[in-house]
Image (cartoon, rainbow, N blue to C red):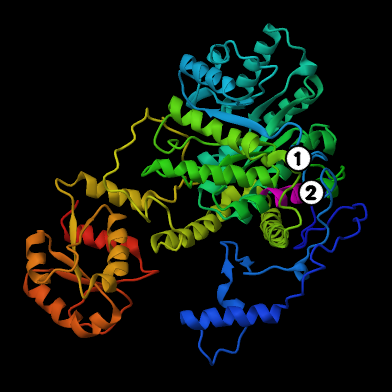
Amino acid sequence: MTEVAETESVPTPGEPDAPEELELAAEFPEASRDQWRELVAGVLRKSGAIDESFDGLPESKLVTRTYDGLEIQPLYTAEDTVDGTGFPGLPPFVRSARPEGAVTTGWDVRARYTRRDAKATNAAILADLEGGVSSIWLRAGATGVPVADLGDALNEVYIDLAPVVLDAGDEYEAAANELFALFAEREIPASAVTATLGADPIGSAARTGSAHPLAPAAELAARVAVSHPKVRTIVADGLPFHEAGGSDAQELGATIAAGVAYLRALTETGLDVDTAAAQIEFRLAATADQFLTIAKFRAARRLWARVTEVSGGKASGMRQHAVTSPAMLTQRDPWVNMLRTTLACFGAGVGGADAITVLPFDAAIGQPDAFSARIARNTHAVLLEESKLAGVIDPAGGSWYVENLTEDLAKAAWREFTAIEAAGGIEAELASGALAARLAETWEKRSKRIGTRRDPITGVSEFPNLTEKAVVRDPLGDLPGGGLPRYRYAEAFEALRDRADAHPSRPRVFLATLGPVAAHTARASFAANLFQAGGIEAVNPGAPEDVVAEFRASGTKIACLCGSNTSYAEEADSVAKALKEAGATSVLLAGKPGDHPDVTGYLFTGCDALEILTGTLNELGVQ
């Protein structure tokens, strides 16, 4: 197999000529970018973001950046057209791996099963199949259904119609043999068998920190390619890199590098490049950031098409399995997860994923129950049947924003991939810890943004519900560890909520509101929301005549001033001093830092909420 060239660009395989362009806005007067800039500058001046002396481009104040450093502009026009996206079903497969997209069949609705009890698993599978699930992702072996019990788990399941995707860790070969025996027992011809055996030694190495040889998986794939032509043996799983806090480009680069490592191992067994590539399925995370998710799946196909082309085969489409991100799921207010997974499923579907798994909303808490499994599969049904989302091939295609984001993400992922290759490949990068270090750097940045609530988590860091009832589920069981960490974005705030809930009484902070209600409502709401994110009740008496007396009656020893800038200038110093004399150990202020000698801390947009909440709980004696 030809080695993949180290280059920053992603060359595009050949494509047919594009059709003649249509002028859709020909009858409307043309608006210039300069006119738009004038309007933007006017709004920014009113908001105070710029002043009359600002001489730069106003849109520069509206640019956002991803964790890969990609700049997302506030406006994209025809001037930002990206060439070389091709056509559906043709290289570079950005627009779809198949000419018809998912128009005729929709995507594969794939449900995950992680219980160890075969009978309970079987009941869940049968219920899901009746409700619209079309393939089965089954954990087997030490962390799932015992391999010997696969037959019981798949009892009365038409496995010739509902493909089985195994996830058996190191026991992949034993699980594969058991599944093949089941096919033979049911007299299903080998030529008709459709399944994915789930061999992923690189993913196991990432999860456990121990090397797992590729040769046995490659040899199994070589045998399967001959005996069962519709079966895939290998999975290149990006979830370990995603759950370790990685960015989209890091996840893509590492997953493509894993695919290349498998491609080398497979061709060493004698398989040609095209047959070897057909043995690999790629698994990627889909998040609630719908546009980055759309771009991720489109970019991934372009990357893999380039890899297979320079490896000596045909530029081939990538078989993609999207999984709604486990990292974005919350244990607190888990109902919001329904919205997150709907957005993620939408993004993966628009991005052209072949199979999509919507994790149930309670997946971060424990084993899903019948209700959460039903909601998960009905998420697909609404998007496919009611929204007709698969009725258009590449619905995001032609969007100047999506095309640019796809292009930029593909280049960033290619840089990550070639860096891994230059360092000796994905196995070497895992063994040396270099990849783990880069993922940790991204997680540190992500953690900071989560902690300062610049990356808000609805129901946890924003708009928490202190009176919610805990959702109780059967435990998930232990998963392999020792390698890359598994993070959930909400876990730091949820740990504070756990501390507060375990305290004999609800910890409280007094909101010392200054001035009329209209003057303090916004900042009082802001402060209350922040404190509640740590499980701390914000006592808000409204507009009391005697703030100090109300504080004494509140039973707490921490106060937070909430008012307008005018009221702060007139009253903050005297009220803060009086509150301290009344027994307040700390007096905070909701607003930007200023010169107030008796104020001990400030709450403002972008402040370190986790640090403030941790200090507040400590001061209140919450262990």
**Tag 2 residue:** 307
Q: Nearer the viewer, mark 2 or mark 1?
A: 2
Mark yes or no: residue 127 visible.
Answer: yes
Q: Which residues are magenta?
A: 297-306
Earlier-in-chain disc, 2 versus 1: 1
User: Would residue 133 be found to the left or right of residue 530 on screen?
Assistant: right
Label 2 with label 1: CB-CB less than 8 Å: yes
Across and down, in percent, residue 248 comes to 60, 54
Q: Amino acid at mark 1?
A: Leu
Q: How many marks?
A: 2
Queried whether the magenta region covers residue 305, the answer comes back as: yes
Asked whether 226 or 131 is in front, the reply is 131
Q: Residue at x 31, y 48 (%)?
A: 465
Q: Please determine whether, in this image, residue 6 is positioned above or below residue 76.
A: above
Mark yes or no: residue 319 visible.
Answer: no
Asked whether 381 or 210 is in front, the reply is 381
User: Would residue 460 be found to the left or right of residue 360 on screen?
Assistant: left
Prevailing SS of the magenta stretch: helix
Q: Amino acid at mark 2?
A: Val
